Amino acid sequence: MAVFPPNSGILPFTLIHNCQKGSKEFEKYNGKGCPISHLKAYCADVCPLEKDEGAAIRLFQKSLTGPALKWFTSLDHSKLASFEQLSQMFINQYSYNLDAKPKRSDLEALNQKGDESFSAYVGRWRAVAAQMRNKLDEEEQINMVTQLAHSSIAGYPMS
């Protein structure tokens, strides 16, 4: 199975050209979420002007944290022939997340952070809600968000 099937939206590492050199802070993958989405973001971020797959493999660890970083460091890097091979291994390792969609309980567990503005919280909440298979109706969404938001909105009427 090819890592970059024609309709996957992932460009092979060697075909990505438009990027800038310099240190890059990568979005960290911890083993949760879609591994293909992470690879797409990584390929869009890395894409060095020189087509050095060895650099792409070495830099990949900077985009990982927690269990995913532990998985990466446990690999025998001397046997990694290409970034495509690493990508396939990564997808295989985290394939159980490919179809994981948030559930109502995931939304109910998504509380507003202490220093987070209400509008930022609602944006983060909506981003998760948009991925659900069984969408909540508008009234359910409003009720849930206002119940989960911290006291910064307490006492204000919702119209």
Image (cartoon, rainbow, N blue to C red):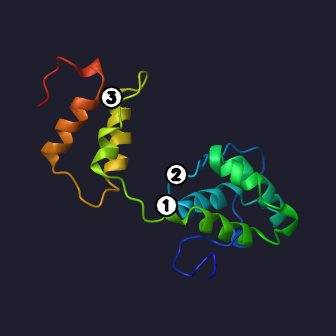
Picture quadrant where residue 118 is located: top left
Q: Label 1: how many residues lie within 10 Å, few (<14), some (14-19) or many (20+)?
A: some
Q: Residue at x 70, y 54 (%)?
A: 71
Task: Give the CA separation, mark 2 to mark 1.
Answer: 7 Å
Query: Which amino acid, by three-letter code, is at mark 2?
Result: Lys
Classify mark 1: helix, strand or loop. Answer: helix
User: Residue 126, labelled with which disc?
Assistant: none
Q: Nearer the viewer, mark 3 or mark 1?
A: 1
Q: Residue at x 73, y 51 (%)?
A: 61
Residue under pointer 1: 97
Q: Residue at x 14, y 29 (%)?
A: 158
Q: Nearer the viewer, residue 74 or 110?
A: 74
**From what the image shows, is residue 42 above or below residue 114?**
below
Q: Position of residue 14 (x, y in %)?
A: 74, 72
**From what the image shows, is residue 142 above or below residue 41?**
above
Classify mark 3: helix, strand or loop. Answer: helix
**From what the image shows, is residue 147 above or below residue 53?**
above
Image position of 86 (left or right of 142): right
Residue under pointer 3: 118
